[in-house]
Amino acid sequence: MLPAAEAEAKILDLVPPPTEVEQVSLDDCLGRVLAKAIPSPLDFPHWDNSAMDGYAVRYEDVQEATAERPKLLTLTETIPAGRSPTLPVGPGQAARILTGSMLPAGADTIVIQEVTQRQGDSVLVLETPEPQQFVRHRGSFCRAGEALMAPGLSIGGPELAVLASAQCLQVPVFPQPRVAILSTGDELVMPDAPLQPGQIVDSNQYALAALVRQAGRIPLPLGIVPDQPQALRAAIQSALAQADVIVSSGGVSVGDYDYVDEILAELGATLHIRSVAVKPGKPLTVATFPAERGTAPLYFGLPGNPVSALVTFWRFVAPALRKRSGLANSWGPTFVPATTRDALKAGGQRETYLWGKLETTTQGYEFTLAGGGHNSGNLINLAGTNAMAVVPVGTKLIAAGATVSVMVVGS
Ligand SMILES: Nc1nc2c(c(=O)[nH]1)N[C@H]1C(S)=C(S)[C@@H](COP(=O)(O)OP(=O)(O)OC[C@H]3O[C@@H](n4cnc5c(N)ncnc54)[C@H](O)[C@@H]3O)O[C@H]1N2
Ligand code: MOO
Ligand SMILES: [Mg+2]
């Protein structure tokens, strides 16, 4: 059994970063990954402008202004945002300026209106400002030609704002990996089928498609595959034709109907991992197919137990998808140190994941174990949780009140 950290590193080594680039319109690129650096077409700010409502002045005119000896300046004009100044500010003059307005020639400093007194077409300055105060200088945020953003960034609200500001209407992004999802098992039926004795609903299909979609990738749910070698072979071949990553659940242990590894080998795949020292999730299969076009397809055979499938997805598949999507770094899951409110028990043989709720308190992170059975077949008490406490190999008990590493998995 491979230790979890080694399995993660091995999996990430198998995943090449994407090389193809596609152009997507600005309106459609939320959640995509930027494929190229975006050079700035212009200076940010585009021109010197005011950060406050007040008066644009020449510093030398007001450097000795006080409430007792205010400085009187003659107003040239009012400059609203969105219009160019029409007059320079000469000695003894000021322009009325609003936040975001362009600085007029000659002015170098903004005096906020709170420290002035308006007198018709003139203004009294009652305080000496700092030189150049409240001026946002042209190019001080980013100069034309410099990179606005590096490749590998996930495009969210701030990134969209930058792209829009730079008038980048077509955005270079990496193609999204297509992730085929297969459920193996003769006992599985769709949620609308009446359950016969021995049958259960294929819940993994829903859970895994949701996690793929939440990760911003495209799930291809390919349905239920019976425990028959021919059917499994055909399903994997069909998945290979459509997907970059294949995620199956079930059929990877040592049972009489666990055919996944055997079929993968028959189809020419290289099996890199067959079991990992995690609980739940031990019988995890990771394989690659020879690359026929572009990148070698990656296969994850997750264990069928519902919690095992999700834990192995969060711990191993999600990082691989992040790297495969072109994200620059931080592929691994997020682990935070938390105080556990409950005692955490484990067997000590495998790194053990116990699900529960992570909360932020004034004391820091706190973890509460989900009530009910911590059994890899129990998906019921997984609902409403957002984290997994990790009990390391060799540890059988983490006492209540002690610190534990917690993997953050959702909201
Ligand atoms: N003799 C041994 N038996 C088992 C071992 C072992 O080491 N020696 N490992 C156990 C562990 S740990 C796990 S985890 C499971 C993994 O089994 P498989 O990946 O082969 O999965 P299946 O046998 O097909 O199913 C296991 C379990 O999960 C249910 N299942 C399967 N698919 C779904 C689905 N899509 N939705 C909901 N539930 C699903 C299935 O009905 C079984 O109950 O093996 C242990 N056995
Ligand atoms: O690894 Mo299994 O996932 O313990 O139930
Ligand atoms: Mg089995």
Image: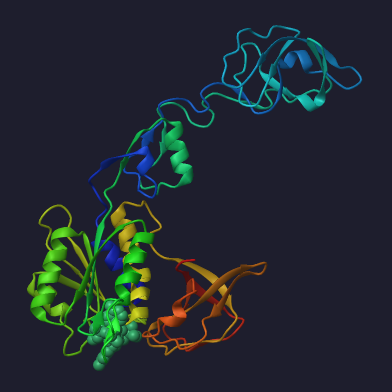
With 89 as the anchor, is 259 left or right in this view? left
In this rendering, the answer to whether 77 lies above or below 271 is above
In this rendering, the answer to whether 173 lies above or below 362 is above
**Image label count:** 0
* Residue at screen point 25% across, 43% down: 21
**Quadrant housing residue 302:** bottom left
Residue lying furthest right: 68
With 268 as the anchor, is 347 left or right in this view? right
The spot of residue 408 in percent (x, y) is: 47, 68
User: Toward the viewer: 20 or 356?
Assistant: 356
With 378 as the anchor, is 11 left or right in this view? left
* Residue at screen point 38% across, 88% down: 349
* Residue at screen point 44% across, 42% down: 159
User: Toward the viewer: 81 or 276?
Assistant: 81
**Quadrant housing residue 27:** top left
The spot of residue 43 in percent (x, y) is: 47, 25
**Viewer can see residue 391:** no
Query: Quadrant location of the N terminus?
Result: bottom left
How is this picture coloured?
rainbow
User: Toward the viewer: 338 or 34?
Assistant: 34
User: Toward the viewer: 6 or 279?
Assistant: 279
In this rendering, the answer to whether 408 lies above or below 169 is below
**Where ligand 1 lies, by image quadrant?**
bottom left
The spot of residue 285 in percent (x, y) is: 23, 75
The spot of residue 376 in percent (x, y) is: 37, 84
**Viewer can see residue 129:** yes
